[in-house]
Amino acid sequence: MTLELVSVSKSVSGRVHIHATDLVLQNGSMNVLLGATLSGKTSLMRLMAGLDKPSSGKILWNGHDVTGMRVQDRNIAMVYQQFINYPSMSVYDNIAAPLRLMRKSKSEIDKAVCESAALMKLTPQLARKPLELSGGQQQRCALARALVKGAGLVLLDEPLANLDYKLREELRTEIPKIFEASGAIFVYATTEPEEALLLGGNTAALHEGRVTQFGLTPEVYRLPKDAVTARVFSNPPMNFISVTKQGDQLSFANEQTAPALQTLDDGVYQAGFRPDHVALTRRTQSALEFKCQVQVSEITGSETYVHMDHQENKWIGLVDGVHHIAANQELSVFLDLAHIYLFGQDGSLLAPATYVKAA
Amino acid sequence: MAKITLSKLAHSYGANPQNEADFALKEMDHVWEDRQAYALLGPSGCGKTTLLNIISGLLAPSHGQVLFDDKDVTHAPTTARNIAQVFQFPVVYDTMSVRDNLAFPLRNRGMDAAYIQSRVARIAELIGMEDVLAQKAQGLSADAKQKISLGRGLVREDVNAILFDEPLTVIDPAMKWALRTQLKSLHGEFGHTMIYVTHDQTEALTFADKVVVMLEGRVVQIGTPEALFEAPGHTFVGHFIGSPGMNFLDATIEGQQAIIDGQMIALGAHYGALSGRTQIGIRPEFIRLNKKEGLPAIISRVEDVGRHKIVRAQVFGHAFNCIAPEGMEISADVMYVTFDPARISVFADDWRVEPNVKKAAA
Amino acid sequence: MQKTVNQKAWFLVLPVFLLVAFSAVIPLMTVVNYSVQDTFGNNQFFWVGLEWFSELLHSERLHAALGRQIVFSSIILAIEVPLGVFIALNMPQKGLWASVCLVLMALPLLIPWNVVGTIWQIFGRVDIGLLGHTLAALGIDYNYTQDPLDAWVTVIVMDVWHWTSLVALLAYAGLQSIPQAYYQAAKIDQASRWSVFWFIELPKMQGVLMIAILIRFMDSFMIYTEPFVVTGGGPGNATTFLSIDLVKMALGQFDLGPAAAFSLMYFLTVMLVSWVFYTVMTNLDKKAGL
């Protein structure tokens, strides 16, 4: 099974929601759509599901054109951010509903419902009504209903966004297991980079209706094609600094210098680095030192977030351990050259951070 | 600005509470210091919203008292308490301009126009909305509306406390950072007493000076983020704080050693005789994976979350999470784990046990 | 959210199409047919073109009826909308009394038009009506069959009694949908009662109030039964509204041609005003939805 989008685009009354997109989702793959609110995640999912018709382009399912086909005629399941269940039916009947529509035999239904309820840890709640359950259990019920019909394509639109933090953590670790057991193509929309990393599989980074990069999740994370993808796939956001290359030297905001790559032309570039690579102590001889003005620091118990201004840029550092850093003081932070990404003026990646290759 | 005292406070929604289970809020005595930022943290249904409503005056507690600076306000209405509150979803006056929204609480109190103007300008700058002051609130995005709500909460300088009820729920992750930091620096600048309700541990820990962890209508621990992380007072705090939470193993405690299935594990301190169910707790951050020594662990899954790896393993048949640094190679076969003895916590019947002799740790 | 395209739905709508065709389109065509012809009975018709229309446009009788109609609709909107909102604001939010209020409010709406007319016709009579008799006993000279002003007051009070509940119920539904957080925020901001109404309740009720105004406008503009039962359009022509005039013309005088032309113009006017309302409403929605 494959789902293929061939230069699919969508405009509504003159406004482009999705720019021409090519995407191939392979059989039994987990695919994360990562992007901020209104970046086009839901629009793209609706196109995949057939809930909306693309303005141009084709959608192929196993090589067959399904572009105009109605969602009811395609084998698709969808789970939303809101917990959508039939309120007057028991959990058992909720899960059984899609199978009854498919006119399965009673014994088949019973077997399938019990299996998926066991997978979703809902067996003790089967006789209860959805509204008597906790939020997490309600969403499990919706997930079970989506999975039970054995759909080839399962679309999950921020399914954990309305859950408590700890419940989210719990379901996050379970979704990959469920996915592995189902063998379907999963598409999972989220705004949180950490969630994408936890789910693994492939990630498509979305920004303003464009898929900026699609590939293996760790690869998209460590080798972003451009600054936009790097920004989308970084929480806290990636830090940037302007760099000038002249001769064999790179000059970082006229403050620090480093030897330059031979292949690079003279000119002005953007350097990016992730908050967790900022250090408060010098770890390598060649590390760059920047003097920043601390805005505020936050302690999570094991780590410290330092929010600071470096010239006109706002930076965030995430350092291990508890550090009480008072606001409005000057602070030296260190950065290994190996952790720096170099982007061109147009945002495209020119040189990845060298630690990626080493790893 | 005020100190908030909760004296023998308890609440039951039913008329005649028979036993503890009937109380949505179990009896508590706490003093919340002036000028501190507190976070109320707990899963949904733990009573944190009930407690917030009692402090804001929306709900009168069935038992006990609430005092602001030693003045009893238990039955005083919201208006008499001089507080500000920011809600989960943006509450803005749609037909007013952004400027009028911000000025509204001041105008209603008859402040003079020059003061209102300067104050509104200051707040607009803080929330980054100087450019849209003249616009109507109606057409703005949810983030922008929530920023107006935050601004309206901060506009009065003389409030006793500012209450936040999960104020960042509707905000995008990238925006959350910016807003939370702004709130934090505003607290540093104005020094209001702030109470922030959330179920998100990162929000709670990064925002607050002191975090109040609640479970089933009870406050299980009040402490700094460090204290909650390093010395959780209850297994629930260990589990709830940290991502993933603390690992627990049933163990017999004998002096300075824990015994699990005949295996000895060194503890950082000496403990007296304990009764009930005894457990040791160790955070994923303080576990070292290696190929040679320690307790055997079966690796079931490795999750690469970018800045580090979460290793899901089995130790003594229990699910066990460890954190390994970015770039560390983890082979899927059997590995060993070692614990940092000083970081092991001991619990009896879910409550933390302090060691006998502190210096034993040395 | 957009809906799925499903052509099957058209088949399900087909019966309604047929029904509407028989109940509305065909009779309407008959009226159009009459409006361009004259008849002297015996089913003999003569083509007159647009003569009836131009005659009606210059008819003082029609102008007077239209004027009365506009005044009537304006007065009852000006009374019923604020009064309905006021009642809704003062109804209990929840509990037993809320249900009791809702049932009491709904009662006038359940009474048929002609019964309402009959009730008020008797109620206002000086000889046996409670209202008329009481007013007379107080020395007030009240007689809706003789005095045009009394007739107007009676018809308006009757309409207010009959229909204010509808506005109140709609406004009440609008108020119920306002989250409690708004009221609490207003308390914290020390907003006055007036501010709460003006900045929270009224903007949130805007949508339902527009619907209430639209419904009440259409209904009152076409009012017939109640004033016909109470005053019969009198005294003189004092309460002869458009529809009463139309009936007089069509059935009283049997001027089918002019009456048909009248009907069409009447119909178009109501359509036009409703369309204007609808456009304004949807534009407001769009603005709010941005």
Image (tube, coloured by chain):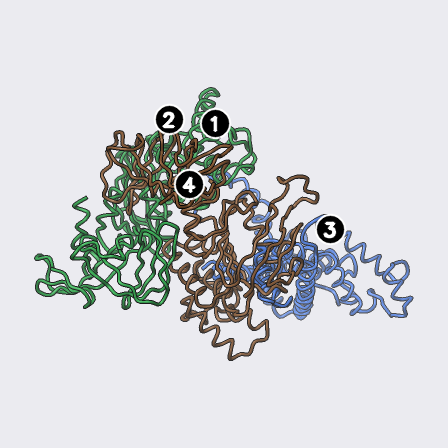
Between label 3 and label 1, give the one nearer the viewer: 3
The amino acid marked with disc number 4 is: Ser
Residue A69 appears in the picture as rendered? yes
Tags 2 and 4 on a common chain: yes
Mark 2 lies on residue: B262
Between label 3 and label 2, give the one nearer the viewer: 2
State the mark number for residue A100: 1
Residue C94 shown left or right of residue A160 in the figure: right
| Letter of the chain that mark 1 sits on in the rendering | A
Chain B: its colour in the image is brown
Tags 3 and 1 on a common chain: no
Looking at the picture, tell me which residue is in the foreground, B34 or B162: B34
Q: How far is disc 2 from disc 4 in space, using C-alphas?
A: 19 Å
Tell me if residue C95 comes above or below residue A249 in the rendering.
above
Mark 3 lies on residue: C97
Helix, strand or loop at mark 4? strand
